[in-house]
Amino acid sequence: MINVSSAAATTLLRVLLRCVVPQGPRLNFWFRAASCQLSPTSVGRRQFSVSPIYRMQWHIELLTTPGPEIAQASVMVHMGKQRYLFNCPEGTQRFCTEHRVRLAKLGHVFLTRVDWQTLGGLPGMLLTVGTAGAKTITLVGGPNSTQALVSARYFIQSPGFSVQTREIREQPHPSSAQYGELTVTPVLAHSQPAPKRVVTMATEDSGSFKRLKLEATEAVDAIAPDESKHAQLQHMLQGMFAVSAPPNGYRALVEAPPTTPQPIAISYICQGPTRPGKFDVAKAKALEIPPGHRYSQLVKGETVTLDDGRVIEPHQCVGPSEPGGLFVVVDCPSLAYLDDVINASQFDPYYGRSLDANPVACIVHIVSPEVLSEPRYAAWMHRFGPHTHHLVTGYGVSPHQVEFASSVREKNALNLINPHVFALPYQAPVTDTVWTAVKSALPASSVLARSLIRFLMAPRKAYDAADQLRSQAPEHYAKLVQTAPMLKDFRQEVDRLRLRLLSLQPPSKTTPGSPRESSPSPRSPVPSGFNDVILTTLGTGSSCPSKYRNVSANLLTIPHRGHALLDVGEGTLGQLYRLLGEEQKDSGHHHPLLQTSVDQCIRDLHFIYVSHMHADHHLGLVGILRRWDELTRSQPGSHRNLTIMAPRSLLAWLREYDQIEPLGLDAASVTFIDAHHMLMRPTSTSPKGPPPSLARLQDALGISVIHTCLAYHCPSAYCITMQHEQGWRVSYSGDTRPSTIFAEMGRHSDLLIHESTLEDDMPHEARAKRHCTTSEALAVAASMKARYTMLTHFSQRYPLAPVFARAQDPENVKQLLLLSGRAKRIGQRGIGVAFDMMSVQMKDFDQLAHYTPALKSLYPPTAETSWAS
C-alpha cells in the first residue's frame, strides 16, 4: 500500500482529467472541483469505502433562458450518476449538443407547466435519449402531462426504454415524493378559470367536411379525478414505451379520452440527500475499532458489533449528519398566478431560516416582467432571508442571447460568399431594462441569470459563472471571420469568386423573365413570376438537430402573396427569428432579400405541408401554430387563412393536443387536407379531384394544383408537387428512396427540393433506412428534368458539409459530388447544396455552382471539426 497525501491525490486527479477527458469549456468546472482538497476518507490507505452519494459534489445548472430562440427556461440538476431536468422546451436537445451537456444519465423530467413552451422539446428528446443509454424516464407534471405525452403516440412507438408519469393531482396540499436522491414538494398555482370555448376544425374527408367540436369549460380544481381515464392513458403510455411488445389490446390509433386545458403553474421545493456526519478516526481508534468495513457501516448509520462483543453506536465516532441542501424552482408566468405562489403554505417552513437551520440555498425564478416588477413578489423574495440566493430569468426579463454560437459563427463566414444568400443571423440589442429598473428592490443576492450559470449545492454553496453564456456583439463574429488564421484560404477563395461572378454578369439588356445568368437549359423560358420566388432552407439535417444543421424545414416565399412551409422540424420558429429578426420601426428589415420580420412572415403564412409523421419533420408545428394564432387572432377573416396538408394522423395529434392547449384551429381560418386524398394515381394524370378547400390556398398563394404520391420511406409518407397559377412548379421529396412515380409526377418541375441523406459510399444503409444517396437524388432530378435542384436533409454524421466531404476522392463518384461538374452531366441545370437559413432567389440559382470552390475551402475534406466550434 502506498500512502498518498491529500494534496498529491488532488494533483494526480487534475492530471488524469486532462489526459483522459476531451477538452472543452465545460471542463473548467470539473478542474475547479478537482482543486478542492480531498477528505482523508477518500485518499491515503484504502481502509474503507463510503457510498459515492454521501460525499458527492452536486449542483444545479440553468441550461436555457427564455427568449425567441428557446421559449422557456430549463434547469438541470447534476447529482452523482443522476440527472434531473426541469422543463424541456423546443431546442433543448440542440442546446445540449452545442454545449456538451450529456443526457445519458437523465432519469427524471419535471414540468412547471403543461404547454408547448415548456414541453415542446420532450418528444424529440425522448426519441434520442434511449439510444444514449437511458433505461427509464419519469415524467412529473400537472394535470394533462400524461395526456400530452400520450398524444404523441402517432409518432413515438417503442423507442427501447420505459417512461412513467406521475401527475400531480388536486389535493389540499400535494405531498412530497422521493425521486432518486431528490425529495420534491410541488406547489400548485392556478390562473383564472378558462372561459368556455368551442373550437371547430375543417377537415377534408372524401369530399365532405366534418366539424370536430372541442369544448373546455372549467379549471382543474372543479374536475374530479377519473380513474378509468387515468387507467386508459396509462395503458396507452405502456404501449408507446414498451421495451419489447406492446401490452395486449394496445392500439395506437384509438382516440384518447377527452380533456380540457388546465392553466396551472407548478413550483418545486427540492431537497438533496442527507450528508452523513464526519467519521472521527481518532475516536474510532480510541474505541479500538479495527479498520475495515465496520468504518463504512458506522458512516452509513449502522450499529456494529466488535469481535469482543462490544456494540458501537454510530454517534460514538460519527458526527451529526447534515440535512440535504434545498433549492426551489418557481414558475409564475403572469400576475394571474401571483397570489397562489406568494401565499402558498408549503413555503412557510423555509422563510427567514438562519444559516445553521438549513436555509433554502437557491431559488430559480421563472417570471414575467410584470411579476418581477410587482412589489409583492419582491417582498416575498425577501422573506427567505439573506442566506438564500436568487437566480432570476423569464421571457422579457433575460436578454435575448445567442444560444447556438457555432451556427452564428458559421453563418458569418458564409456571409462573405454572398450576403443575400447567406444573410447574417439576427442579433437583438442586448438590453436589461426590466432588470435595471427592479434590481434595487430585490434581495442583494439576486442575479440576472444567463444560460449555463451554475449554483454549487455541495460540498459548498456558491455561484459558478465561469461557463455561462456571454453575449457577443455582431462585430465580434465579423472580426473573428476576418482574422481567423484557419480561414485564410477561404477568404482568398471568396476574393476569386467575386471576380469570377463579375465576369459572368449579363448584358444590361435582358429579356423579361430571363435569369441573371444565361440558362444552359434547352427547355422553354422560365415561367412568369418564378424568378422572384425565394427558397429558404431553414433546417437541413436529418433525424435530430446538431450544432450546424437543425432538422427539416423549408420556407417558400411567393412575393406579394405570402409563404409556405414544407416540413416544420423542431426549432423552426427559432430559426425564423434568427433569420428574419424582429419588426423594425425605423431601420427597415434585417434580411436583405426577404424584407420581412419573423412576426410578419408568420402572419403571411398560408400553407404548411408535413411530408410524414417522423418527429424531425413536424415537431416545430405546434410552436408555429401558437404564434400564428396569437398574431392573427384579431385580423380580418380573409387574411387569417391557413391550409395544413399532412398525413391524417397529424390531424388526430393536433386535435388531441388542442384540447390541452388551444391552437386556434377554427374552421373559418384553418383547413386541413389529408395528403392521401391528393394522390396521383398511376393510371391517371390527375388526382381523384381537388377538394373545395384548395380554393382558399389558391386565393392566398396562387397555388392551383397539388399532387402527392406515396414515398418509399414509412407508412403514410408522401412526396408533393405544387403548381402555381402562373405555370411554375415546385416538387418536394420529403424522405424517400428514389421514386420513378415522383419523378413522373414532378416532370419539368422548375424547382426540386430533394433529400440527400447519405453519401454515395453508403448505399446499403440508404436502402435499409429508406433514404437517398447524393447520386440517387441527382438521378431523380435528371429523370424529372427539373430546372433547379436543391439537395437537403443531410445525415448528422456529417457535421460540416457532407456533399463536399469526399469531393476529392475518385472512388466516391467524383463527378456526382462536384456540383458544377454534376450540373453539366444532367444538362447544365443548377444544383444547390442547402445550408441552414440559406435563401436563394430563383433568378440567382445558377450562381450556386460557382460557390463550390469557396465552400470546399471552408469545409476541407479532411476536417473532423469546424473552426466555428
Image: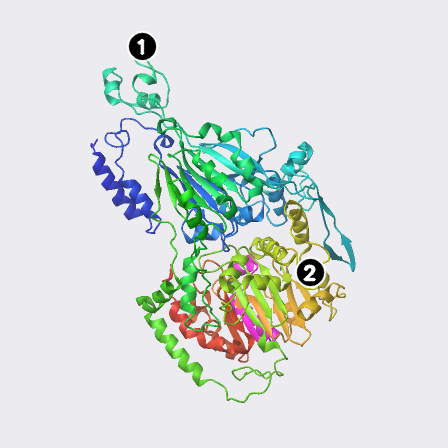
**Residue 705: quadrant of the picture:** bottom right
What segment carries the magenta color? 763-790
Q: Which residue is depicted at the point 54% across and 39% down?
A: 338
- Tell me if mark 2 has few (under 14), some (14-19) or many (20+) residues whose alpha carbon lies within 10 angstroms of its own: many
- Relative vertical location of residue 30 with respect to residue 743 in this rendering, above or below: above
Q: Position of residue 290 (x, y in %)?
A: 26, 19
Front position in the image: 9 or 797: 9
- Tell me if mark 1 has few (under 14), some (14-19) or many (20+) residues whose alpha carbon lies within 10 angstroms of its own: few
The disc at residue 309 is 1
Does residue 103 appear in the picture of this structure?
Answer: no
The quarter of the image holding the C terminus is bottom left
Q: Position of residue 558 (x, y in %)?
A: 61, 71
The disc at residue 675 is 2
In the image, residue 771 lies in the stretch drawn in magenta: yes
Q: Amino acid at mark 2?
A: Ala
In this rendering, position of residue 832 left or right of residue 217: left
- Relative vertical location of residue 414 with respect to residue 176 in this rendering, above or below: below
Instruction: Assign a secondary structure to mark 1.
Output: loop
